[in-house]
Image (cartoon, coloured by chain):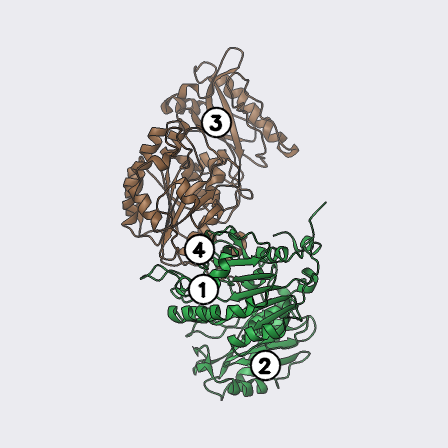
Chain colours: A green, B brown
Amino acid sequence: MIDLDQFQKLTKSTPTKIVMLVLDGLGGLPHPDTGLTELETAVTPNFDELAAKSICGLSHPIDFGITPGSGPAHLALFGYDPMKYTIGRGVLESLGIDFDLRKTDVAARGNFCTVDHDGVVTDRRAQRIPTEQSSKLCENLSKIKLSGVDIKVVPVSEHRFIVVFRGQSLDDRIADTDPQHEGMYPLKARPLVLDAEATASIVNDFIDKAKKSLSGSHPANMLLLRGFSKLSAMPSFSELYKLQAAAIACYPMYLGLSKVVGMKTYRCECTEDEFSILSDIYTEHDFFYIHIKKTDSHGEDGSYATKVAEIEKIDSLLPQILKLDPDVIVVTGDHSTPAAIKGHSWHPLPLLLHSKWCRADETQSFGETACASGVLGNIKAVNIMPLAMANALKLNKFGA
Amino acid sequence: MIDLDQFQKLTKSTPTKIVMLVLDGLGGLPHPDTGLTELETAVTPNFDELAAKSICGLSHPIDFGITPGSGPAHLALFGYDPMKYTIGRGVLESLGIDFDLRKTDVAARGNFCTVDHDGVVTDRRAQRIPTEQSSKLCENLSKIKLSGVDIKVVPVSEHRFIVVFRGQSLDDRIADTDPQHEGMYPLKARPLVLDAEATASIVNDFIDKAKKSLSGSHPANMLLLRGFSKLSAMPSFSELYKLQAAAIACYPMYLGLSKVVGMKTYRCECTEDEFSILSDIYTEHDFFYIHIKKTDSHGEDGSYATKVAEIEKIDSLLPQILKLDPDVIVVTGDHSTPAAIKGHSWHPLPLLLHSKWCRADETQSFGETACASGVLGNIKAVNIMPLAMANALKLNKFGA
């Protein structure tokens, strides 16, 4: 896509509305018995009918062969070059739980973990202790005093929490303390650049005091930190696209990511609520990002059948979007999560874009193979927003 | 593809193995009688069966419309942006004959040629004199003394040789002395930048003395130099991909190119040997580049029928790769050499990539038209290595 500074000059506010429905981990791999992916197996009359009226293709989240994390995959969907703009895990998690992060804060994602007598990690997730238990531990850890720096420790869910270091001249270029494998010692917070030495020393002080505070609380008797990060500067949706954007999701991280680009966030308890809230707020915004988490979760679990069922459920809810008659509808995923791989993968995602002006192609169903023959071909995800904006007639001419 | 510095952070060593079979000059043009290219005419049951289980596409060596030399075409296949990394012909030929090139050396590819009484080139290849004859001439030329610079003149094959200028502060930005056409005078070695003036003067001294040394040895009574170059700095295969790579080829230049990126090279006398050596060394490496030269040679000669026959021969040898059951198999070419053009061309190459995770498309045979409908579509060759690495499960996730 073209440079954002150039792109921003083309955008204009109009009454048209765009809905972007993102099925997390949508892309899959063929089942050995049928040769069909999860999406191709699912009975999706509504997606198929929409695909037949759309222009279709395959979306590469980052580039050929690259398996993305959720952060860069979403930045690309939102039209930001994920090689240029980065979002640390600590920032994402903080924003997702409505923590009021400041530009000078350094945030980290934390796990409570279990260590043995020698200090070796035996369970990186401390038996996934209940949130109410970790909330009490976070409360204790928040009482830790360090000179010149305020510490906030806030629970996320189960063994997950965030730590925010608030002070002056803090640097986020610090390596993870999570060794990523059991049977190893937690790592020291190591500065990645000289400028981060002072901050790393503060983090290590915190960890030492936290270890003492947790020593009696088996199984959560230690913590691991990763994704040290600060808010990065990028143009907001309102600046870049002149859109008043809404994000609808169940899971904190995706709401956090949406906040980074200036969307108003709507947190839901379940998938059905996401579709009903869309109707409720439809007059208040002109861009709607709806995030469906469970397609990814089932893929991560290696559960082909439940991923199929979740896709069918979303298909059955699609008419709730259609009846609002948005000017542009985009349906895709952020990355593939094939049940066969039980994790994110590099495979491109089926993509459909429907509008009055889309010049629909001959794709008759919504699936990996069908969309591969779509007129959009193989495109990078970062190009989806420019296409959506064009189809919403929200872009001025480039050049005379 | 993404920046190599970023890419290098994603790569990991695993036991999986990748075989990349490169048929030089594979791409062709339709025969006027049948409308089929050389590859489409060839009976290739093994390639076709593999294509049916693969993801296919068309590989553009450099970019739309660009006809590459063998150097940039191979760098792209190996995953190095050929616009950023360059390999001069002199360096390539030197490495291909196992010459121990140093970082400060300037190397040039030489041709013995024939000039008439007036010094006009009448045969750019001196009747392709036998290697043993040119070896003697090279021995004489090596005796030439120049102040402050050592000269090495080493035969390659027939009329081809290399000259290496070894000294301090030598600059390789010097234009070719080969006028590329008969009926013209050899050119002076002309500096392309001011800094190369001293080196150009040394080269011209050498040429003057060489001309005297050769004056009695018709038909090789003069020499032409091209591709003045130094070794360029690029990350090796082991640094970039964490692969222990092997290169199997018959022709020096391709082995030279492989050495530049740190592959261990295995020189073979004939095509059949290339396939048997693959089996011999299969346990010792995790990446195998196999180069087939004759497809290109027949294309250069304008010989449609023998190019077809060579492709059929490679097809018959393919089962020797298949029985090793590599995790990833890539089959493509470095560039097209249509018999109709008798030279390299810009036409994209048929490409197949097979792995357990490739999400095979509906392509049922290996050919230009069939692969054009493959799901990979039109891709730049530089993306092949990232895809091969992804399919070998040798890449970590990008970002959180």
As drawn, the label of residue A45 is 1
Between the C-alphas of marks 3 and 2, the distance is: 71 Å
Front tag of 1 and 4: 1
Residues indicated by labels 1 and 4 sit on the same polypeptide chain: yes
Residues indicated by labels 3 and 4 sit on the same polypeptide chain: no
Which badge, 1 or 4, comes first in the chain's sequence? 1
Residue at x 58%, y 23% (from the top left corner): B188
Query: Residue B341's spot in the image, x, y percent?
Result: 45, 28
As drawn, the label of residue A154 is 2
User: Quick check: A378 above or below B25?
Assistant: below
Q: Secondary structure at mark 2?
A: strand
Labels in figure, total: 4
Between the C-alphas of marks 2 and 4, the distance is: 45 Å
Q: Quadrant of residue B265?
A: top left
Q: Indicate the amino acid at tag 4.
A: Ala
Front tag of 3 and 2: 2
- For mark 3, what is the residue? B110
The chain containing the residue under callout 1 comes to A
As drawn, the label of residue A370 is 4
Query: Residue B354's spot in the image, x, y percent?
Result: 36, 51
Q: Check if mark 2's residue and mark 4's residue have beta carbons within 8 Å.
A: no
Q: Indicate the amino acid at tag 3.
A: Gly
